[in-house]
Image: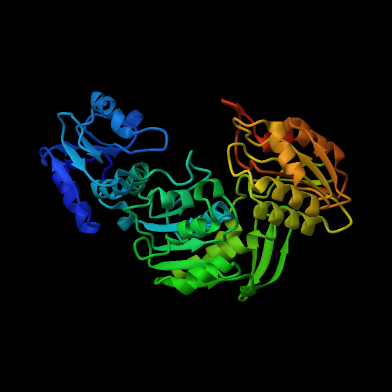
Amino acid sequence: MNTKRSTSIGAVLSAACGRKGFEYELIGDDKIVITDVTHSTAAVLPGALFVCVTGENVDGHELAQRAIDAGAVALLVERRLPLDIPQIVVADTRKTQGTIAAAFWGFPSDDLLLIAVTGTNGKTTTSHLLGSILRQHGLRTEVMGTLSGSRTTPESTDLQRQLAQFIDRNVQAVVMEVTSHAMVLHRVEGTHFALAIFTNLTPEHLDFHGTMERYFAAKASLFTSSYTSVGIVNYDDVHGRLIADTHEIQCLPFSLHDVQNISASASSHEFTWKTHQVKVNVGGKFNVSNSLAAVTAAVQLGVSETDIVAGLAAAETVPGRFEQVRASSGFDVVVDYAHTPDALQRVLLAARDVVGVKHRVLVVFGCGGDRDSEKRPHMGAIAAKFADYVVVTSDNPRSESPAAIAQNIIDGIGTHGANTIVKTEIDRRLAIQLALNSAKSGDIVVIAGKGHEKNQTIGNNVLPFDDVAIVREILGVVA
Protein backbone atom coordinates (compact mmCIF):
# COMPACT_ATOMS: atom_id res chain seq x y z
CA MET A 1 0.00 0.00 0.00
CA ASN A 2 1.35 3.39 -0.97
CA THR A 3 0.16 6.44 0.93
CA LYS A 4 0.52 8.45 -2.26
CA ARG A 5 -2.77 7.09 -3.46
CA SER A 6 -5.39 8.08 -6.01
CA THR A 7 -8.68 6.48 -6.94
CA SER A 8 -12.07 7.46 -8.28
CA ILE A 9 -15.02 8.47 -6.14
CA GLY A 10 -17.03 5.65 -7.67
CA ALA A 11 -14.46 3.04 -6.65
CA VAL A 12 -14.30 4.38 -3.11
CA LEU A 13 -18.08 4.38 -2.73
CA SER A 14 -18.34 0.85 -4.11
CA ALA A 15 -15.72 -0.44 -1.67
CA ALA A 16 -17.20 1.45 1.29
CA CYS A 17 -20.75 0.24 0.68
CA GLY A 18 -19.48 -3.28 0.11
CA ARG A 19 -17.99 -3.25 3.60
CA LYS A 20 -20.74 -1.38 5.44
CA GLY A 21 -23.85 -0.45 3.54
CA PHE A 22 -25.15 3.10 3.77
CA GLU A 23 -27.40 5.29 1.67
CA TYR A 24 -25.96 8.14 -0.34
CA GLU A 25 -26.68 10.40 -3.26
CA LEU A 26 -23.85 11.26 -5.63
CA ILE A 27 -24.13 14.61 -7.35
CA GLY A 28 -21.60 14.84 -10.17
CA ASP A 29 -19.10 12.60 -11.91
CA ASP A 30 -18.16 9.37 -10.11
CA LYS A 31 -14.98 9.16 -12.20
CA ILE A 32 -13.42 12.17 -10.45
CA VAL A 33 -10.12 11.02 -8.93
CA ILE A 34 -9.35 11.84 -5.30
CA THR A 35 -5.94 11.70 -3.61
CA ASP A 36 -6.90 12.01 0.08
CA VAL A 37 -9.83 12.18 2.48
CA THR A 38 -9.79 14.83 5.21
CA HIS A 39 -12.15 16.70 7.52
CA SER A 40 -9.69 19.54 8.19
CA THR A 41 -9.35 22.56 5.93
CA ALA A 42 -5.79 22.95 7.20
CA ALA A 43 -4.94 19.51 5.80
CA VAL A 44 -6.56 19.90 2.37
CA LEU A 45 -4.19 19.29 -0.53
CA PRO A 46 -5.01 19.31 -4.26
CA GLY A 47 -7.20 16.33 -5.09
CA ALA A 48 -8.73 15.85 -1.64
CA LEU A 49 -12.23 14.75 -0.77
CA PHE A 50 -13.26 17.21 1.95
CA VAL A 51 -15.67 16.01 4.63
CA CYS A 52 -18.10 18.65 5.91
CA VAL A 53 -18.62 17.64 9.54
CA THR A 54 -21.22 19.42 11.64
CA GLY A 55 -19.32 20.03 14.87
CA GLU A 56 -20.27 21.49 18.21
CA ASN A 57 -18.77 24.89 17.39
CA VAL A 58 -18.13 24.83 13.65
CA ASP A 59 -20.21 23.55 10.73
CA GLY A 60 -17.84 22.14 8.13
CA HIS A 61 -20.36 22.92 5.38
CA GLU A 62 -19.54 26.59 5.92
CA LEU A 63 -15.87 25.80 5.21
CA ALA A 64 -16.48 24.00 1.92
CA GLN A 65 -15.46 26.92 -0.28
CA ARG A 66 -12.24 27.33 1.68
CA ALA A 67 -11.50 23.65 1.11
CA ILE A 68 -12.19 24.00 -2.61
CA ASP A 69 -9.87 26.99 -2.78
CA ALA A 70 -7.18 24.82 -1.17
CA GLY A 71 -7.61 22.12 -3.82
CA ALA A 72 -10.50 19.87 -2.77
CA VAL A 73 -12.14 18.23 -5.81
CA ALA A 74 -15.17 16.68 -4.08
CA LEU A 75 -17.22 16.98 -0.89
CA LEU A 76 -18.87 14.59 1.56
CA VAL A 77 -21.90 16.50 2.87
CA GLU A 78 -25.15 16.15 4.80
CA ARG A 79 -26.96 18.60 2.56
CA ARG A 80 -26.40 19.67 -1.03
CA LEU A 81 -24.36 22.85 -1.31
CA PRO A 82 -24.69 25.44 -4.12
CA LEU A 83 -21.18 24.65 -5.37
CA ASP A 84 -20.13 23.32 -8.77
CA ILE A 85 -18.22 20.30 -7.48
CA PRO A 86 -19.06 16.59 -7.03
CA GLN A 87 -20.85 15.97 -3.74
CA ILE A 88 -21.66 12.77 -1.86
CA VAL A 89 -24.73 13.40 0.30
CA VAL A 90 -25.17 11.17 3.37
CA ALA A 91 -27.21 11.33 6.56
CA ASP A 92 -24.24 11.66 8.93
CA THR A 93 -20.84 12.72 7.62
CA ARG A 94 -19.08 12.14 10.94
CA LYS A 95 -20.27 8.54 11.03
CA THR A 96 -19.65 7.87 7.34
CA GLN A 97 -16.24 9.51 6.92
CA GLY A 98 -14.38 6.68 8.67
CA THR A 99 -15.70 4.02 6.30
CA ILE A 100 -15.07 6.29 3.29
CA ALA A 101 -11.50 6.98 4.44
CA ALA A 102 -10.88 3.30 5.18
CA ALA A 103 -12.13 2.37 1.71
CA PHE A 104 -9.93 5.01 0.09
CA TRP A 105 -6.84 3.67 1.90
CA GLY A 106 -7.72 0.05 1.14
CA PHE A 107 -9.03 -0.86 4.62
CA PRO A 108 -5.59 -0.82 6.28
CA SER A 109 -6.80 -2.50 9.48
CA ASP A 110 -7.21 -5.69 7.42
CA ASP A 111 -3.43 -5.81 6.89
CA LEU A 112 -2.37 -5.10 10.48
CA LEU A 113 -2.55 -6.93 13.77
CA LEU A 114 -4.61 -4.18 15.37
CA ILE A 115 -5.44 -4.20 19.09
CA ALA A 116 -7.72 -1.73 20.88
CA VAL A 117 -7.37 -0.80 24.55
CA THR A 118 -10.20 1.01 26.32
CA GLY A 119 -11.13 1.82 29.92
CA THR A 120 -11.02 4.77 32.29
CA ASN A 121 -7.54 4.09 33.65
CA GLY A 122 -4.61 1.98 32.51
CA LYS A 123 -4.99 2.32 28.74
CA THR A 124 -1.57 3.85 28.16
CA THR A 125 0.38 1.48 30.40
CA THR A 126 -1.42 -1.59 29.06
CA SER A 127 -0.77 -0.48 25.48
CA HIS A 128 2.93 0.03 26.09
CA LEU A 129 3.34 -3.28 27.91
CA LEU A 130 1.58 -5.19 25.14
CA GLY A 131 3.63 -3.31 22.56
CA SER A 132 6.82 -4.45 24.29
CA ILE A 133 5.62 -8.07 24.31
CA LEU A 134 4.77 -8.00 20.60
CA ARG A 135 8.19 -6.54 19.77
CA GLN A 136 9.80 -9.32 21.81
CA HIS A 137 7.71 -11.73 19.72
CA GLY A 138 9.35 -10.33 16.61
CA LEU A 139 6.61 -8.06 15.33
CA ARG A 140 7.36 -4.52 14.22
CA THR A 141 4.92 -2.72 16.52
CA GLU A 142 3.63 0.82 16.99
CA VAL A 143 1.64 2.17 19.95
CA MET A 144 -0.92 4.94 19.47
CA GLY A 145 -2.54 6.89 22.27
CA THR A 146 -2.22 9.60 24.87
CA LEU A 147 1.54 9.89 24.45
CA SER A 148 1.58 9.98 20.65
CA GLY A 149 -0.78 12.75 19.58
CA SER A 150 -3.02 15.66 20.49
CA ARG A 151 -5.99 13.28 20.59
CA THR A 152 -5.75 9.90 22.29
CA THR A 153 -7.72 8.39 19.41
CA PRO A 154 -7.32 10.36 16.15
CA GLU A 155 -10.26 11.49 14.05
CA SER A 156 -11.24 8.76 11.61
CA THR A 157 -9.76 10.34 8.48
CA ASP A 158 -6.45 10.86 10.28
CA LEU A 159 -6.54 7.36 11.76
CA GLN A 160 -7.00 5.59 8.43
CA ARG A 161 -4.19 7.62 6.86
CA GLN A 162 -1.92 6.83 9.81
CA LEU A 163 -2.65 3.11 9.58
CA ALA A 164 -1.86 3.19 5.86
CA GLN A 165 1.42 4.95 6.59
CA PHE A 166 2.28 2.27 9.14
CA ILE A 167 1.83 -0.38 6.46
CA ASP A 168 4.11 1.56 4.11
CA ARG A 169 6.74 1.46 6.89
CA ASN A 170 6.33 -2.33 7.21
CA VAL A 171 4.69 -2.09 10.63
CA GLN A 172 2.99 -5.38 11.46
CA ALA A 173 1.13 -4.66 14.71
CA VAL A 174 -0.50 -1.59 16.24
CA VAL A 175 -1.77 -1.26 19.80
CA MET A 176 -4.02 1.77 20.15
CA GLU A 177 -6.02 3.43 22.89
CA VAL A 178 -9.69 3.88 22.05
CA THR A 179 -11.57 6.40 24.17
CA SER A 180 -15.27 6.69 24.93
CA HIS A 181 -15.26 9.97 23.00
CA ALA A 182 -13.86 8.08 20.01
CA MET A 183 -16.73 5.61 20.10
CA VAL A 184 -19.44 8.27 20.40
CA LEU A 185 -17.81 10.38 17.68
CA HIS A 186 -17.29 7.38 15.35
CA ARG A 187 -13.51 7.74 15.13
CA VAL A 188 -12.93 4.01 14.61
CA GLU A 189 -15.61 3.45 11.96
CA GLY A 190 -14.15 1.38 9.14
CA THR A 191 -11.65 -0.22 11.52
CA HIS A 192 -11.63 -3.83 12.71
CA PHE A 193 -9.53 -5.01 15.64
CA ALA A 194 -8.03 -8.46 16.19
CA LEU A 195 -9.07 -8.02 19.80
CA ALA A 196 -10.13 -5.30 22.24
CA ILE A 197 -9.04 -4.93 25.87
CA PHE A 198 -11.19 -3.47 28.66
CA THR A 199 -9.21 -2.27 31.71
CA ASN A 200 -11.83 -0.79 34.07
CA LEU A 201 -14.57 1.82 34.36
CA THR A 202 -14.91 4.54 37.00
CA PRO A 203 -16.58 7.98 36.87
CA GLU A 204 -14.95 10.26 34.27
CA HIS A 205 -16.02 12.44 31.32
CA LEU A 206 -19.51 12.81 32.76
CA ASP A 207 -19.52 16.38 31.46
CA PHE A 208 -19.54 14.76 27.99
CA HIS A 209 -21.58 11.58 28.52
CA GLY A 210 -24.02 12.86 31.14
CA THR A 211 -24.42 9.61 33.05
CA MET A 212 -22.35 6.55 33.97
CA GLU A 213 -24.80 4.43 31.99
CA ARG A 214 -24.02 6.35 28.80
CA TYR A 215 -20.31 6.33 29.58
CA PHE A 216 -20.36 2.55 29.97
CA ALA A 217 -22.46 2.11 26.83
CA ALA A 218 -19.87 4.06 24.85
CA LYS A 219 -17.03 1.86 26.11
CA ALA A 220 -19.02 -1.34 25.72
CA SER A 221 -19.98 -0.56 22.11
CA LEU A 222 -16.40 -1.43 21.13
CA PHE A 223 -17.06 -5.04 22.16
CA THR A 224 -19.36 -5.87 19.26
CA SER A 225 -18.81 -7.76 16.03
CA SER A 226 -18.75 -4.45 14.14
CA TYR A 227 -15.33 -3.75 15.64
CA THR A 228 -13.82 -6.97 16.97
CA SER A 229 -14.43 -10.67 17.50
CA VAL A 230 -12.56 -11.10 20.81
CA GLY A 231 -12.66 -9.12 24.05
CA ILE A 232 -10.11 -9.24 26.87
CA VAL A 233 -11.93 -8.00 29.97
CA ASN A 234 -11.02 -7.21 33.57
CA TYR A 235 -13.07 -9.62 35.66
CA ASP A 236 -12.15 -7.71 38.84
CA ASP A 237 -14.29 -4.84 37.52
CA VAL A 238 -18.07 -5.20 37.56
CA HIS A 239 -18.29 -3.55 34.15
CA GLY A 240 -15.83 -6.05 32.71
CA ARG A 241 -18.01 -8.89 33.95
CA LEU A 242 -21.06 -7.17 32.48
CA ILE A 243 -19.41 -6.94 29.07
CA ALA A 244 -18.46 -10.61 29.21
CA ASP A 245 -21.97 -11.66 30.24
CA THR A 246 -23.98 -9.55 27.80
CA HIS A 247 -21.98 -9.23 24.57
CA GLU A 248 -22.10 -11.66 21.67
CA ILE A 249 -18.36 -11.77 21.01
CA GLN A 250 -15.93 -14.13 22.73
CA CYS A 251 -14.66 -12.55 25.97
CA LEU A 252 -11.61 -13.79 27.86
CA PRO A 253 -11.20 -12.65 31.49
CA PHE A 254 -8.14 -11.57 33.44
CA SER A 255 -7.99 -11.11 37.21
CA LEU A 256 -5.54 -10.57 40.02
CA HIS A 257 -6.58 -14.05 41.13
CA ASP A 258 -4.61 -15.35 38.12
CA VAL A 259 -1.28 -14.56 39.80
CA GLN A 260 0.47 -14.90 43.15
CA ASN A 261 3.21 -13.23 45.16
CA ILE A 262 2.38 -9.68 44.10
CA SER A 263 4.80 -6.99 45.25
CA ALA A 264 5.66 -3.50 44.10
CA SER A 265 8.01 -0.58 44.66
CA ALA A 266 8.24 2.94 43.29
CA SER A 267 10.11 1.63 40.25
CA SER A 268 8.71 -1.85 39.50
CA HIS A 269 6.17 -4.55 40.25
CA GLU A 270 6.50 -8.31 40.42
CA PHE A 271 4.25 -11.36 40.48
CA THR A 272 4.23 -15.08 39.80
CA TRP A 273 2.35 -16.09 36.64
CA LYS A 274 2.06 -19.84 36.15
CA THR A 275 5.65 -20.97 36.78
CA HIS A 276 7.21 -17.63 35.85
CA GLN A 277 8.47 -14.93 38.18
CA VAL A 278 7.65 -11.73 36.32
CA LYS A 279 9.24 -8.33 36.92
CA VAL A 280 8.03 -5.19 35.17
CA ASN A 281 9.89 -1.88 35.39
CA VAL A 282 6.71 0.10 36.06
CA GLY A 283 6.03 1.01 39.68
CA GLY A 284 2.80 0.68 41.63
CA LYS A 285 0.86 -2.43 42.63
CA PHE A 286 -2.19 -1.28 40.63
CA ASN A 287 -0.17 -1.80 37.44
CA VAL A 288 -0.24 -5.58 37.98
CA SER A 289 -3.75 -5.51 36.49
CA ASN A 290 -2.45 -3.69 33.42
CA SER A 291 0.30 -6.28 33.03
CA LEU A 292 -2.28 -9.05 33.21
CA ALA A 293 -4.37 -7.38 30.51
CA ALA A 294 -1.32 -7.40 28.25
CA VAL A 295 -0.45 -10.99 29.19
CA THR A 296 -3.97 -12.29 28.48
CA ALA A 297 -4.08 -10.51 25.13
CA ALA A 298 -0.66 -11.87 24.18
CA VAL A 299 -1.68 -15.44 25.02
CA GLN A 300 -4.75 -15.07 22.81
CA LEU A 301 -2.52 -13.79 20.00
CA GLY A 302 -0.33 -16.87 20.21
CA VAL A 303 2.73 -15.33 21.86
CA SER A 304 4.89 -17.80 23.77
CA GLU A 305 5.16 -17.60 27.55
CA THR A 306 8.90 -17.00 27.18
CA ASP A 307 8.33 -13.98 24.93
CA ILE A 308 5.60 -12.65 27.22
CA VAL A 309 7.84 -12.70 30.30
CA ALA A 310 10.82 -11.28 28.39
CA GLY A 311 8.64 -8.62 26.76
CA LEU A 312 7.35 -7.42 30.12
CA ALA A 313 10.88 -7.35 31.52
CA ALA A 314 12.06 -5.30 28.53
CA ALA A 315 9.28 -2.72 28.82
CA GLU A 316 10.56 0.76 29.56
CA THR A 317 9.05 3.08 32.14
CA VAL A 318 5.92 4.70 30.73
CA PRO A 319 6.24 8.50 30.91
CA GLY A 320 4.02 9.98 33.60
CA ARG A 321 2.67 6.62 34.76
CA PHE A 322 3.94 6.12 38.32
CA GLU A 323 7.20 7.44 36.90
CA GLN A 324 9.93 7.50 39.51
CA VAL A 325 12.18 10.56 39.53
CA ARG A 326 15.41 9.22 40.95
CA ALA A 327 17.27 11.43 43.40
CA SER A 328 19.61 11.10 46.36
CA SER A 329 17.13 12.87 48.60
CA GLY A 330 16.30 9.88 50.79
CA PHE A 331 12.65 9.90 49.75
CA ASP A 332 10.85 8.67 46.63
CA VAL A 333 9.17 10.93 44.08
CA VAL A 334 6.70 9.65 41.49
CA VAL A 335 4.83 11.55 38.80
CA ASP A 336 1.52 10.11 37.66
CA TYR A 337 -1.27 11.06 35.27
CA ALA A 338 -3.94 10.22 37.88
CA HIS A 339 -6.70 12.75 37.27
CA THR A 340 -9.80 10.80 38.28
CA PRO A 341 -10.95 9.85 41.79
CA ASP A 342 -10.30 6.16 41.20
CA ALA A 343 -6.88 6.72 39.65
CA LEU A 344 -5.83 9.02 42.49
CA GLN A 345 -6.92 6.45 45.07
CA ARG A 346 -5.04 3.66 43.28
CA VAL A 347 -1.88 5.74 43.08
CA LEU A 348 -2.03 6.78 46.74
CA LEU A 349 -2.65 3.19 47.86
CA ALA A 350 0.30 2.08 45.74
CA ALA A 351 2.41 4.80 47.34
CA ARG A 352 1.35 3.59 50.79
CA ASP A 353 2.41 0.07 49.82
CA VAL A 354 5.87 1.46 49.03
CA VAL A 355 6.48 3.31 52.32
CA GLY A 356 4.25 1.42 54.76
CA VAL A 357 2.78 3.05 57.85
CA LYS A 358 6.02 4.32 59.36
CA HIS A 359 6.58 6.93 56.65
CA ARG A 360 4.40 9.51 54.95
CA VAL A 361 2.64 9.83 51.62
CA LEU A 362 2.66 13.42 50.31
CA VAL A 363 0.58 14.36 47.29
CA VAL A 364 0.41 17.41 45.02
CA PHE A 365 -2.61 17.61 42.71
CA GLY A 366 -5.32 19.79 41.22
CA CYS A 367 -8.29 19.37 38.87
CA GLY A 368 -8.68 20.60 35.31
CA GLY A 369 -10.85 23.58 34.50
CA ASP A 370 -13.79 23.41 32.07
CA ARG A 371 -14.09 19.70 32.81
CA ASP A 372 -16.20 17.47 35.06
CA SER A 373 -16.46 19.57 38.23
CA GLU A 374 -18.32 16.93 40.24
CA LYS A 375 -15.16 14.89 40.74
CA ARG A 376 -13.28 17.71 42.52
CA PRO A 377 -14.64 17.26 46.07
CA HIS A 378 -14.36 13.48 45.69
CA MET A 379 -10.68 13.82 44.83
CA GLY A 380 -10.18 16.11 47.81
CA ALA A 381 -11.72 13.52 50.10
CA ILE A 382 -9.58 10.73 48.61
CA ALA A 383 -6.38 12.76 48.97
CA ALA A 384 -7.11 13.56 52.61
CA LYS A 385 -8.06 9.98 53.40
CA PHE A 386 -5.10 8.21 51.79
CA ALA A 387 -2.27 10.76 52.10
CA ASP A 388 -0.62 12.33 55.12
CA TYR A 389 0.23 15.65 53.50
CA VAL A 390 -1.80 17.24 50.70
CA VAL A 391 -0.95 20.26 48.56
CA VAL A 392 -3.87 21.39 46.40
CA THR A 393 -2.72 23.31 43.33
CA SER A 394 -3.49 24.10 39.69
CA ASP A 395 -3.84 21.58 36.85
CA ASN A 396 -4.80 23.21 33.55
CA PRO A 397 -7.40 25.62 34.98
CA ARG A 398 -8.20 26.85 31.47
CA SER A 399 -10.93 29.52 31.66
CA GLU A 400 -11.85 28.86 35.30
CA SER A 401 -10.45 30.51 38.40
CA PRO A 402 -7.65 28.31 39.81
CA ALA A 403 -8.57 29.43 43.33
CA ALA A 404 -12.22 28.46 42.80
CA ILE A 405 -11.22 25.01 41.54
CA ALA A 406 -8.95 24.55 44.55
CA GLN A 407 -11.80 25.52 46.86
CA ASN A 408 -14.05 22.92 45.19
CA ILE A 409 -11.41 20.33 46.07
CA ILE A 410 -10.99 21.60 49.64
CA ASP A 411 -14.78 21.51 50.12
CA GLY A 412 -14.68 17.74 49.75
CA ILE A 413 -12.12 17.12 52.45
CA GLY A 414 -14.49 17.66 55.39
CA THR A 415 -13.68 15.23 58.18
CA HIS A 416 -11.68 12.91 55.95
CA GLY A 417 -8.14 12.47 57.15
CA ALA A 418 -8.45 14.43 60.37
CA ASN A 419 -4.71 14.12 60.89
CA THR A 420 -3.80 15.00 57.31
CA ILE A 421 -1.96 18.26 56.69
CA VAL A 422 -3.67 20.18 53.87
CA LYS A 423 -2.08 23.13 52.09
CA THR A 424 -3.15 25.23 49.12
CA GLU A 425 -0.61 26.68 46.70
CA ILE A 426 -2.04 27.76 43.35
CA ASP A 427 1.36 28.08 41.68
CA ARG A 428 2.07 24.47 40.69
CA ARG A 429 5.84 24.87 40.74
CA LEU A 430 5.75 26.30 44.25
CA ALA A 431 3.34 23.55 45.29
CA ILE A 432 5.78 20.89 44.11
CA GLN A 433 8.60 22.68 45.89
CA LEU A 434 6.55 22.86 49.10
CA ALA A 435 5.93 19.10 49.07
CA LEU A 436 9.55 18.25 48.26
CA ASN A 437 10.81 20.55 51.01
CA SER A 438 8.41 18.91 53.47
CA ALA A 439 9.38 15.32 52.63
CA LYS A 440 11.64 13.37 54.96
CA SER A 441 13.77 10.28 54.50
CA GLY A 442 11.58 7.25 53.80
CA ASP A 443 8.59 9.30 52.59
CA ILE A 444 7.12 9.27 49.09
CA VAL A 445 5.92 12.34 47.18
CA VAL A 446 3.23 11.79 44.53
CA ILE A 447 2.77 14.54 41.95
CA ALA A 448 -0.52 13.70 40.27
CA GLY A 449 -2.69 14.87 37.42
CA LYS A 450 -0.44 15.93 34.56
CA GLY A 451 1.87 12.96 34.15
CA HIS A 452 3.55 13.11 30.74
CA GLU A 453 2.11 16.53 29.80
CA LYS A 454 4.61 19.23 28.90
CA ASN A 455 2.44 22.32 29.31
CA GLN A 456 -0.10 24.06 31.52
CA THR A 457 -3.19 25.80 30.12
CA ILE A 458 -4.10 28.97 32.02
CA GLY A 459 -6.79 31.07 30.39
CA ASN A 460 -5.97 31.17 26.69
CA ASN A 461 -2.26 30.68 27.33
CA VAL A 462 -0.50 27.34 26.90
CA LEU A 463 2.67 27.59 28.95
CA PRO A 464 5.58 25.13 29.16
CA PHE A 465 5.33 23.00 32.28
CA ASP A 466 6.79 19.55 32.93
CA ASP A 467 6.31 17.99 36.37
CA VAL A 468 9.30 15.65 35.96
CA ALA A 469 11.59 18.46 34.81
CA ILE A 470 10.44 20.69 37.68
CA VAL A 471 11.19 17.97 40.23
CA ARG A 472 14.65 17.40 38.78
CA GLU A 473 15.35 21.12 38.79
CA ILE A 474 14.30 21.54 42.43
CA LEU A 475 16.24 18.47 43.57
CA GLY A 476 19.25 19.27 41.41
CA VAL A 477 18.99 16.05 39.44
CA VAL A 478 20.65 15.83 36.02
CA ALA A 479 18.39 14.05 33.52
Residue 378, percent across and down? 70, 50
Tell me where residue 50 appears, x and y as whole percent.
27, 35
Number of labelled discs? Answer: 0
Would residue 17 appear left or right of 193 to someone viewing this image? left
Residue 135 visible, this angle: no
192 or 273, nearer to the observer: 192
Considering the image in quadrants, where does the C terminus appear? top right
- Residue 163 at x, y percent in the picture: 35, 48
Q: Is residue 232 above or below residue 91?
A: below
The answer to whether residue 79 is left or right of residue 435 is: left
Q: Is residue 109 left or right of residue 77?
A: right
Which residue is pictured at 76% across the width and 36% down the height?
A: 432
Observer-nearest residue: 133 or 105? 105
Residue 156 visible from this viewpoint: yes
Q: Nearer the viewer, residue 315 or 29?
A: 29
Which colour assignment does the render follow?
rainbow
Vertical comparison of 227 with 177: above or below: below
Q: Residue furthest bottom?
A: 275
Q: Is residue 140 above or below residue 298?
A: above
Q: Position of residue 396 (x, y in %)?
A: 62, 34
Q: Quadrant of residue 367?
A: top right
Is 31 in front, or is 310? Answer: 31
Q: Is residue 370 left or right of residue 21?
A: right
